[in-house]
Amino acid sequence: MNTANPLRHKVAIAGAASTGFTAANTASTQTALAAQACIDVIRACGLTASDIDGLCGSTPPSAELQAALGIPRATWVASPFIPFGNHVAAAVSAVHSGLAEVVLVYHAAYRQAWNTSSSLKDPFRRIATPGLTEPHPGPETMAASVGYTAWASRYIHEYGADKADFGLVAINERTNAAMNPLAAITKPITMDDYLSARMIRHPLCLLDMDLPVDGADAFIVTTAERARDLPLPPVLVDAVVLGQVAPNEEDQIRGLGHHGQQVVIDTLKAKSEFWIDDVDVYFPYDGFTILALSWIENAGWCGPGEAGDFLREHWDSSSNRVLIDGRVPINPHGGSLSEGATQGSGHVREAVHQLQGLAGERQVADAQRALVTPGGFFFNAQGMTLARG
């Protein structure tokens, strides 16, 4: 593999914390949720507010959170767009370049008017939804989530895939969520439950789409050297990359074999010390079930159109979930479909906790390496390899 990766093992995630997630409108604001997760991770890492010199998060604004936490000064701040891989890439780059030494990275998921009708009816949540009063494309546009339903149809057409292939992703996530006290929904589901779920936009039903939640995750990103002096085992960043192609609009990419995921995988594989044969836990993004199937295929676990058969081959009937080669779980926290729509922060947090040995009932024995691939096809494909320090 290519060794042209100057930041390898120079930067670490020293800790991660979460408020847990609720699939209902809570009485908390985004700022309150983010602040609680940040306070918890700062304390878990044995730090104080004055140790933080960088902030990275899209919601709430960094200035607002800095004031809430009493962080006296920062030498670097950033507000990347979701998914959360953008945040990790920005923070890692800042630490490696010396712009900051200890970066507080955070993301508050929040049920807003764009992702749940109950929030559309709530005047306070309407106010908290950016861009709600701005013009939006009409109902027949391919933009945003509708694009994935169209590509799911293309996937079925091109590969002869079965609707049940998507259901295997949803069932696996729900089974895993039952072991996660942070998860919003933990009730097990069957294939019959999946196939009879309310259709939202063919071929994707309610159980194919991530779950709007209130909750927050927070992380400390710092130098590997400093992380080794903190209380928790450091999680070293082996590599982190972002991927995008042109054209990049939902209806303009050339096909299922030419989008951001392929860019991520090609680059990440070249920059990483290890790949799928050596990982102990895998985190494909599952904002929609089609995304998880696509990531599994592009990562190299199987060929194009073969993800459903791959999941069946590695299905552990005794636990009703996927265990690759009988040992590697996929999204052991329940992913976006069941823990909640964290836009990738939950995937990263679970990877950190697995590598630190803090995953409780879900813990993979002696987990040393994780592959995390947040995001989708278009402007938001991302990936990272993480290793226990």
Image: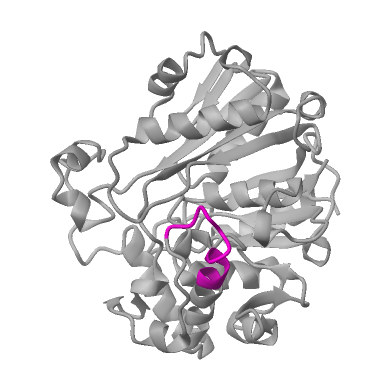
Give residue 170's position: percent from left, percent from top: 49, 74
- Name the residue: 34% across, 72% down: 206
Residue 170 can be seen in this image: yes
Q: Is residue 55 above or below residue 110?
A: above
- Residue 154, by quadrant, is bottom left
Q: Which residues are magenta?
A: 173-184
Image coloring type: one colour
Q: Quadrant of residue 318?
A: bottom right
| Residue located at (71% from left, 73% from top) | 301
Which residue is outermost to the top?
Answer: 72
Counting from the top left corner in percent of width and height, residue 298 is at 64, 68
Using the rendered view, name the quadrant where residue 110 is placed: top left
249, 105: nearer the viewer: 105
Q: Residue at x 27, y 47 (%)?
A: 112
Task: Point out residue 278 in the picture as x, y percentages from the top left corner.
Answer: 83, 62
| In the image: residue 381, left or right of residue 370 | left
Image vertical order of residue 318 relative to residue 209, above or below:
below
Q: Would you say 313 lies left or right of 178 here?
A: right
